[in-house]
Image (tube, rainbow, N blue to C red):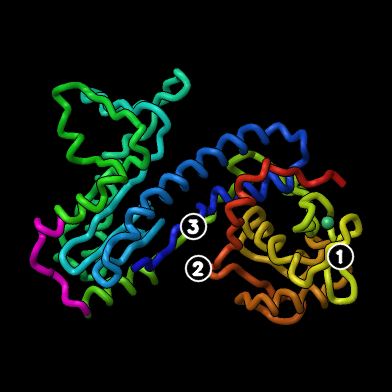
Amino acid sequence: MIVLPLKLPISALQCMALLRRLPKNHPMRPKIEKDLRAWLKGYYGEKEFSYYLSFLPEDQYYIFHGLRLKDKKAFQMDVLIVSQAFALIAEVKNISRRLIFNKETNHVTKEFNNEEEGIPNPILQVKRQRMQFINWLEKVQMKGLPIERLVVISKTSTLVETTPDNQQIFKELIYAESSIDKLQELEEKYEKPRFSKKKLTQLVNLLLTHHQPLIPDILQTYNISKDEIKTGVICPKDHISTMTYYSGSWHCLSCHFSSKTAHHPAVDDYFLLLGPTITRKQLAEFLHIGSTYIAGNMLRALGLPLTGAKRGTTYFLPQNYEFIQPDETDIKLPVHTFPVK
Ligand SMILES: [Zn+2]
């Protein structure tokens, strides 16, 4: 069963929010668009893999997508599968043409459109994650489960190449297509359950409570200042107009769409771009509403945790906040621009 479902990575949501809210001619746009394409590619690769995982028996395997834990340093696993007999960490790679492993240097190169680009070695990445996961399990007193690791290449059209003396890498990576076979192989290798059903449930709950998603400081990443971010509620219908709030609803004066909840994505954008805390005044300014009283009501309605009282109240983003996921058609839309005021 899927414990942590696959979602768009937060960095992709941040790039989308930036592209919505940066001026059309902003010099960072090409870089952000390129990065967004890379995040989406990774996401689609994982989606491909998760399709094959959906054939696994529900009651035997627990699947986590994007689980992020803290050992000494934080580490994030593309996919973690746990059962009573073993656990498997998978690093998923979605590469268009060729993936070349160099034995001497341990370097990995990907080739696309006749251009070569070095990428972090996924085998070493997943090896490191395995070490960190083993340490983490020891710390929470959950030792005893064999931990396997794997690099999963999402497309069968990706050519994986290396020198004849480096063929052992093919034991450490598979195409997504053969994931079920691989898991059956592991089932045979680890026939005997190491954890009771009860202990496995305990582990699953521990993993969930220790999951710490990271929201990177994206403005710093792209060297963008706060006042370059366009504020306001974007019309969900035409994607370009700013909405006006009156009589308890948001109204688009160009396409006449109205909605009571159009500010929800704007609140997400605020948290994605500007930081994990917000006051009534900050929200009122961001949404272009004159009243901090209404802003306060909106924040309360969102059920966000808070500290302080009255004017000093600060609301903050809970650890496992669910950002609104754009639906697939929205992801494919040409990246739209928010109008310059
Ligand atoms: Zn509109």
Q: Report the side of 268 relative to 201 (left or right).
A: right
Query: Pointer 2 and pointer 1: residues touching (CB < 8 Å)?
Result: no
Residue at 16 percent of width and 22 percent of height = 164
Give the amino acid at mark 2.
Answer: Asn
* Residue 175 lies within the magenta run: no
The percent coordinates of residue 12 (x first, y second) are 56, 48
Question: Above or below — where is 7 with respect to 307?
Answer: above
Q: CA distance from mark 2 to mark 3?
A: 13 Å
Residue at 32 percent of width and 28 percent of height = 159
Q: CA distance from mark 2 to mark 1?
A: 31 Å
Q: Which residue is mark 2?
A: 320
The label number, if any, that marks residue 251 in the structure image = 1
Residue at 38 percent of width and 54 percent of height = 51
Observer-nearest residue: 182 or 23? 182
* Residue 193 lies within the magenta run: yes
Q: Can see residue 74?
A: no
Q: Which residue is most to the top?
A: 114
In what element is the residue under mark 2?
A: loop
In what element is the residue under mark 1?
A: strand
Residue at 51 percent of width and 38 percent of height = 38
Q: Quadrant of residue 123?
A: top left
Instruction: Give neighbour class at mark 2: few <14, some 14-19, many 20+ (Cα, 10 Å).
Output: few
The percent coordinates of residue 308 (x first, y second) are 66, 78
Q: Earlier in the sequence, mark 1 or mark 3?
A: 3
Q: Earlier in the sequence, mark 2 or mark 1?
A: 1
Q: Quadrant of residue 265?
A: bottom right
In magenta, the rendered stretch is 186-197
Q: How many marks?
A: 3
Q: Can see residue 337?
A: yes
The label number, if any, that marks residue 7 in the structure image = 3
Say whether mark 1 is within 8 Å of ligand 1. Answer: no
